Amino acid sequence: MKRIFTVVAAVFMLLVNVPLSFAADDITGHYFEKDMRTLIEKGIMKGYEPGVYKPDASVTRAEFTAFIVRALELEPVHTAEFSVANLADSKFSDVKAGAWYYSAINTAVETGIVNGYPDGSFKPGKEISRQEMAVMAIRAVSSKGVLSETAKLTFKDLAEIHPSYIESVQRAVYLKLMSGNADGTFAPLSMTTRGQTAAVINRMMNLVEPPKSLDYKVAAFNSDGTPNILKEYDSFETAKANITDKQAVLYGNSIVYMKKGIAAANKFTIIHNRADLSDSGRTYVNTGTEFNYFDATEKSVKIQLGDALGYVSPEDVNLIPSVVSNERSYYKRTGKELYHTVYNPITKAYSPATLIGLAPSFMAEGQEYYSWNGVHFTTASGATAGEAYTYFNFLPLHVKTSYTAEDIDSFLTEKFPSTYKGFQTSPLAGTGKDFKEMEAKYEVNALYLMAHAIHESAWGTSPIAQDKKNLYGMKAYDGSPYESATKYESFRDSIEDAAKYIAQAYQSPKGSYYNGAVLGNKSVGMNVKYASDPYWGERIAGHMYRADLFLGSKDINTQKLAVSNVESLNVRSGYGTSYGIIYEMKISGIPFVYTETAQKDGALWYKLVSDEKTNRSGHVYGKGSLGTFVKEAKLAK
């Protein structure tokens, strides 16, 4: 009898202990337990305290935004390999730098998932309704390239859905992200719960990364861009071989192959050198960046940005066939100046035109031109228009400006924008001497240091500039830009720290991030590994151009520029291969200033202003029997 009791007791203890791993929390047995556990395990949803997740609690706009950003992995990756320049400016009056939801909201806004209110607020603590959740959920999956149609709604309370939310609810129902209640209603105004939110986000993740059991579908496209499925295939390669120029291959609800179109980054995206993506990556871009599309496999998508070809993960980009959209970023000449209008395929919006510098002479007034590197331009038909380098974007930044500290202060004082409310005078006024001091000390162009500070700190008005005297976003990482940003005692200290760092890491051939001592683009220069914005370099060049124009145009086009035309170009201490190598230009397209040319052993050589600080007198093989190693840079003028 005792033995039987012992066995029964043991079995009872086993039965009691099995669920104890979950019994201590408040979601065990809940209708949405499985969805919530999935999000908890992935770190998307967190508890209030051990075992407390509140599945029936309402969800705020800030919370739902954070869930989406985590689930879709929209925030940048920060490693020593990838430095990301950031502004710590809040986009809303009630979203302050330092708030736990600050970064998530800014990221979601940039991706087009959420918007604010007309009064400039976001209302992060406002509870989110089911119809609002439908809108944000559809924007989120659309930003990842998920296509959808509209379902016919038969809910009893259909009339209660706000007219501007109807289409999102239709698409959410079609994609089975959301459904009605048991009583036949949708309850659009009801506040959504954490459990319901977990279910919707879990379904979103399955849409973005569908199970591998699905077939590949060949689709044509209707006039509104929705797909019309023509046939299904059991493999990527078979489907790929059976499409025309106006068709595409879908997997789940996403395009995975097309013949013509563009690709767009749907998150912070690393561009790799190898098709198998096994390398650490050459550069990186932010959400919404356009790529020139070449090809796609199941493992990678072949693209171009700048001059370089590269490969990205299929999950990181949306493929947009030409038959669906021909919207593109473009350049335009206005008067004598060149402006760049950037298109974001994710948000389907154009940015305000940015002044870059002087326009090339071959451009006609008001006509749109296209370029992947800001140098080689085509017309809308694809015909070659011409080649031109905008001076300040491709000027080596160790070349000193001709302007004095007083000149720089004059520009900072007189051209300070009146749009910065609360500032009667420029916060940067009086820093001219600091920029010139660091130019002399570290050989970094003072006009550039000023322009960079203007760009990163919004003329010294940003929160981290005002509170931490940080003008360059140093260590202002996206996850916590305000908290992580370095604090300085003065603007001068910030300028010195930036000048020293840039000189060592970006302008020196020995530097960790050296790709040429210019601002550049995503192929050459600082922009390769300083900022995720692919047009960061030309934006700063635009500030340099404005300052130079205001001060009398004493700097522009005063230096002769040329660029390397081979993957490996040795810079030597004299004319001829018998002279020692100072350093090597390891990529094609690196710009340099040259002072003269000479013939040596039947070849043309260039004498250049070396990027190596210890020996500014360099010499490179230009053109001869070995080939064309150097090309003259045709300056826009």
Image (tube, rainbow, N blue to C red):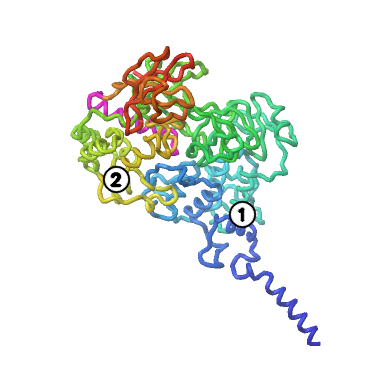
| Residue located at (30% from left, 35% from top) | 444
Where is residue 464 shown, x and y percent of the image? Answer: 33, 48
Q: Amino acid at mark 1?
A: Ala
Q: Is residue 359 visible?
A: no
Lower sequence index among marks 1 and 2: 1
Q: Secondary structure at mark 2?
A: helix
Q: Amino acid at mark 2?
A: Ser
Where is residue 449 shown, x and y percent of the image? Answer: 30, 36
Instruction: Mark 1: give few (<14), some (14-19) or many (20+) Cα within 10 Å.
Output: many
Q: Residue furthest top?
A: 602
For mark 1, what is the residue?
199
Q: Residue furthest bottom?
A: 1
Decide: is 306 above or below 11.
above
Q: Residue 494 got which mark?
A: 2
Where is residue 483 shown, x and y percent of the image? Answer: 38, 53
On whether residue 532 falls in the magenta region, the answer is: yes
Residue 237, image quadrant = top right
Taking the image as shown, residue 242 lies to the left or right of residue 517, namely right
| Residue located at (58% from left, 31% from top) | 302
Residue 537, image quadrant = top left
Q: Is residue 380 visible?
A: yes
